[in-house]
Amino acid sequence: MPDPRFVTPPSSLERSSIPAHVAIVMDGNGRWAQRRGLARTEGHAAGETALVDTTYGALSLGVKALTVYAFSTENWRRPVDEVRFLMNFNKGLLERRQHELHEEGVRIVFSGRRDWRVPKGVAARMDEARELTKKNKVMTLNIAFNYGGRAEIVDAVRELMTDGLSAKDVDEAAIRRRLYHPELPDPDLVVRTSGEFRTSNFLLWEMAYSELVFTDVLWPDFRREDLFDAIGEYQRRERRFGGLDK
Ligand code: IPE
Ligand code: IPE
Ligand code: MG
């Protein structure tokens, strides 16, 4: 993998308005494989190169946080073999990549529920990667795993109640503080690959004012150039946050 320090992003990108937080719905793995006459799982495997290249692209631009949707709370509905593959694949991905990401100063964190369905071996690798990289400051890679936007809000509300807040103390800040990663800014840009125009329960609270970019590229084909294109589109948007001025 090329060193991100030697990768020059296109000069057309405005360096002063790089999104601080980019989030990606990595979709289209199954279709990528099917178009090649391969098993769907081959598409998931091919997504690893896309993820690593995109991470380097984000690093080369100075993006501070990259959240990627790896497994949703609804993905348990898939055939058991595919679910089992995805569990092992994500475990293997951490084993294979955590050290090089650590060397680049990437802090690896996870958003999602640690329920009984997440195999112990996978949870152990997640803890290991988080522990190894916890002091890193260059960029946060937030892997949304067994993640659902509704589950995240439910978990925050449960915590509000455990903390004994009364109704008058419940406001947006109180909820926000109890999301999985309150230290991360809301995503400025959310990208979804594979030509689907929906959120599929991703970052429901956090994407209230995100710019959304959809691309037909299937996730295994996605590379840093596609990230640069999405950021170019983001930079042509005018964000208003409900007001009239930028
Ligand atoms: C995204 O690719 C990966 C996961 C949801 C884990 P898909 O597996 O959803 O691929 P398509 O959408 O069926 O092509
Ligand atoms: C969203 O993709 C979840 C991930 C990319 C992990 P899906 O493929 O599961 O979403 P739907 O089913 O098309 O909405
Ligand atoms: Mg899909």
Image (cartoon, grey):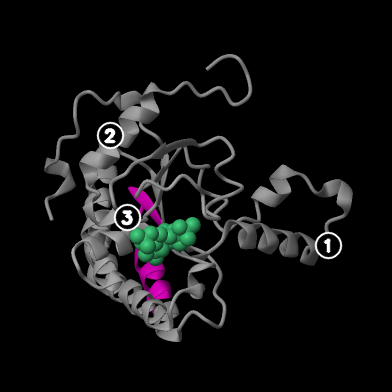
Circle 3 sits in a helix, a strand or a loop, which is it? strand
Circle 1 sits in a helix, a strand or a loop, which is it? loop
Q: Earlier in the sequence, mark 3 or mark 1?
A: 3
Position in image of residue 183 (x %, y %): 53, 49
Q: Earlier in the sequence, mark 1 or mark 2?
A: 1
Residue at (50% x, 74% y) in the render: 76
Q: Which residue is mark 2?
A: 229
Viewed as shown, does residue 48 lie left or right of 117? left
Q: What type is the residue that disc 1 sits on?
A: Gly
Residue at mark 1 to residue at mark 2: CA–CA distance = 46 Å
Magenta-tinted stretch: 125-144
Between residue 19 and residue 26, name the one nearer to us: 26
Between residue 118 and residue 40, name the one nearer to us: 40
Position in image of residue 14 (x %, y %): 30, 23
Residue at (54% x, 74% y) in the render: 114
Quarter location, residue 48: bottom left
Position in image of residue 99 (x %, y %): 24, 66
Residue at mark 3 to residue at mark 2: CA–CA distance = 23 Å
Q: Earlier in the sequence, mark 3 or mark 2?
A: 3
Quadrant, the N terminus: bottom left
